[in-house]
Amino acid sequence: MNIRKLYFVLTLTVVILVSGIGNMYVQRKGEHGWVFHIFTQKMSAKSNQHNVAGHVDFDYTFVEDTDSVSMLSTVKFPIGTKPVSIDIVSAGKSYNFSPEIIYVKPKGKMSLEYRFKISFPFSIWNEIYESPLPFSLQYNTILQETEHTASFGYDKSKWGANQKKMLAIIEIIKYNTNKL
């Protein structure tokens, strides 16, 4: 092993150990190139026009072949709610997506749990985590012919720690996929 590769491996090992990201994701190389799966994270409700759960759970999967990230999220809505779109709002920009519904199941007497999938380019994912301000997820729905938005986001105190960890994972993806 030459000196450059040894230095890279040692630097990467230190980053993983210091940042505490080792248990946040898995990576594998297969027929679609590198695949990284980042385990479930949570965001708290920030604004809520109807009775939505107090948080959203979400995870990411990056696939090298498509240079894209899929975000799967799980959130509860009242029965009768029709999901329309999901926005990622970051640093004054808003990215709008039509979600794919993975499943819907009853949750309690008056709610349904939805599992959604949206996909977007790696560059957008990198951008939202490079911003010093936390991004938010906005779920746009229709309930009884009225539009509603449920917004979820990080507290600023939680954003700093999460942002650093996610940027370390993004950096590892860049190393593995020759984006640096």
Image (cartoon, rainbow, N blue to C red):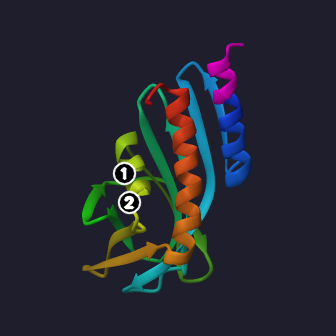
Answer few, some or many: residues within 10 Å of disc 1's Cα (few below 14, many 20 plus, some between 14 and 19): few
Asked if 44 appears above or below 89 in the picture, the reply is below
Image location of residue 66, percent across then percent down: 41, 29
Q: CA distance from mark 2 to mark 1?
A: 6 Å
Taking the spot 66% from the left edge, 36% from the top edge, the residue there is 11
Asked if 62 appears above or below 73 in the picture, the reply is above
Of 139 and 12, which appears nearest the observer? 12
Question: Does dot 1 land on a helix, a strand or a loop?
Answer: helix
Q: Is residue 110 visible?
A: yes
Asked if 144 appears above or below 4 in the picture, the reply is below
Q: Which residues are magenta?
A: 1-8
Image location of residue 147, percent across then percent down: 26, 78
Say whether marks 2 and 1 touch (CB < 8 Å). Answer: yes
Taking the spot 62% from the left edge, 80% from the top edge, the residue there is 108
Give the tally of numbered discs: 2
Which residue is the extreme one toward the top? Answer: 1
Magenta segment, principal secondary structure?
A: helix
Image side of residue 68 versus residue 4, left or right = left
Looking at the picture, which amino acid does disc 2 mark?
Answer: Ser
Question: Does dot 2 land on a helix, a strand or a loop?
Answer: loop
Taking the spot 45% from the left edge, 74% from the top edge, the residue there is 152
Looking at the picture, which amino acid does disc 1 mark?
Answer: Glu
State the image quarter where residue 93 is shown: bottom left
Q: Is residue 15 magenta?
A: no
- Residue where numbered disc 1 is placed: 127
- Residue where numbered disc 2 is placed: 131
Q: Is residue 23 visible?
A: no
Of 85 and 42, which appears nearest the observer? 42
State the image quarter where residue 46 is shown: bottom left
Image side of residue 150 versus residue 41, left or right = left
Answer few, some or many: residues within 10 Å of disc 2's Cα (few below 14, many 20 plus, some between 14 and 19): few
Image side of residue 167 versus residue 21, left or right = left
